[in-house]
Image (spheres, rainbow, N blue to C red):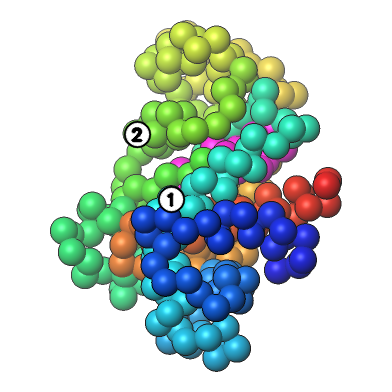
């Protein structure tokens, strides 16, 4: 990472907490090692020796993940002034899971793994702002509907939406009523089997491609594009890391 990016990360990763463990000799090098794993999709044991002992970097990644560091960073970035937050959008994508992702304790369903048309999969549910920058991400088993991912996304920390864009997979009376109670306008195409079709503003709805482009950027991180992690916490951690990296490119350039 650049010096400017490190200046943003440093206050968060150098503060000791309940899950901080022993202080690494070089937090920046450890963080770079985690980013290298996220970008390349390599196994932890293949981590280049330049970053230090792989097991030490992995343990620090788990400590930071379980302490909620990545989520905290994402929340802090979303509080940045000057980004589009009035219009928001949600969507989901299915990720193929490698066979080595199976076998975690408590069973695969609790770890966000399941069976869908794509086989052994995980589904990422994503909420972005009007510029296509991530606000929150959640994961479920691959067969879980988009409808089920709506509430966890909207309940996550972040700016309140005034307009929400979503595809017809989110077309339900419950979702529309929920948005209406919060004062948000729903720009959601109706399903074809609805008796009463609701018209939407096609020009505003066209902005929804930004959440799809955000997924494309996230999948440049190979550790996210294919799931290798057994635990939901670790995999979600890599999703949040990829989201933070997208934010950092924008945030650093603006400052």
Q: Residues within 10 Å of mark 1 (few under 14, many from 20)?
A: some
In percent of the image, x 23 and y 53: which residue is there? Answer: 109
In percent of the image, x 64 and y 60: which residue is there? Answer: 10
Q: Is residue 41 visible?
A: no
In percent of the image, x 60 and y 41: which residue is there? Answer: 76
Q: Quadrant of residue 19?
A: bottom left
> Between 191 and 169, which is closer to the camera in this rendering?
169
Q: Main secondary structure of the magenta part?
A: strand
Q: Residues within 10 Å of mark 2 (few under 14, many from 20)?
A: few
Residue picked out by circle 1: 68
Secondary element at image label 1 = loop
Question: What residue range appears in magenta?
Answer: 123-135
In percent of the image, x 58 and y 66: which residue is there? Answer: 221
- Image coordinates of residue 14 in percent, x first then y, are 56, 61
Secondary element at image label 2 = helix
Residue picked out by circle 2: 148
Res 199 label: none
The stretch drawn in magenta includes residue 124? yes
> Between 162 and 212, which is closer to the camera in this rendering?
162
């Amino acid at each position: 990472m650049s010096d400017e990016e490190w200046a943003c990360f440093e206050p968060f990763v150098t503060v000791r907490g309940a899950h901080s463990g022993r202080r690494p000799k070089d937090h920046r090098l450890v963080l770079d090692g985690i980013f290298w794993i996220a970008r390349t999709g390599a196994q932890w044991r293949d981590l280049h020796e330049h970053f230090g002992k792989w097991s030490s970097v992995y343990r620090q990644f788990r400590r930071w993940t379980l302490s909620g560091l990545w989520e905290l960073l994402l929340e802090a970035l979303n509080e940045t002034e000057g980004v589009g937050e009035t219009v928001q959008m949600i969507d989901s994508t299915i990720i193929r899971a490698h066979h080595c992702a199976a076998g975690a304790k408590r069973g695969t369903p609790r770890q966000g793994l399941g069976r869908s048309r794509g086989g052994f999969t995980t589904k990422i549910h994503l909420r972005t702002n009007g510029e296509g920058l991530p606000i929150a991400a959640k994961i479920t088993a691959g067969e879980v509907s988009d409808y089920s991912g709506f509430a966890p996304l909207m309940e996550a920390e972040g700016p309140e939406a005034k307009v929400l864009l979503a595809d017809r997979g989110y077309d339900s009376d419950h979702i529309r009523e929920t948005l209406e109670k919060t004062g948000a306008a729903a720009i959601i195409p109706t399903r074809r089997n609805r008796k009463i079709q609701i018209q939407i503003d096609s020009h505003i709805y066209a902005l929804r491609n930004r959440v799809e482009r955000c997924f494309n950027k996230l999948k440049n991180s190979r550790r996210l594009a294919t799931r290798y992690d057994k635990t939901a916490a670790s995999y979600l951690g890599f999703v949040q890391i990829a989201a933070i990296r997208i934010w950092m490119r924008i945030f650093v350039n603006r400052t």
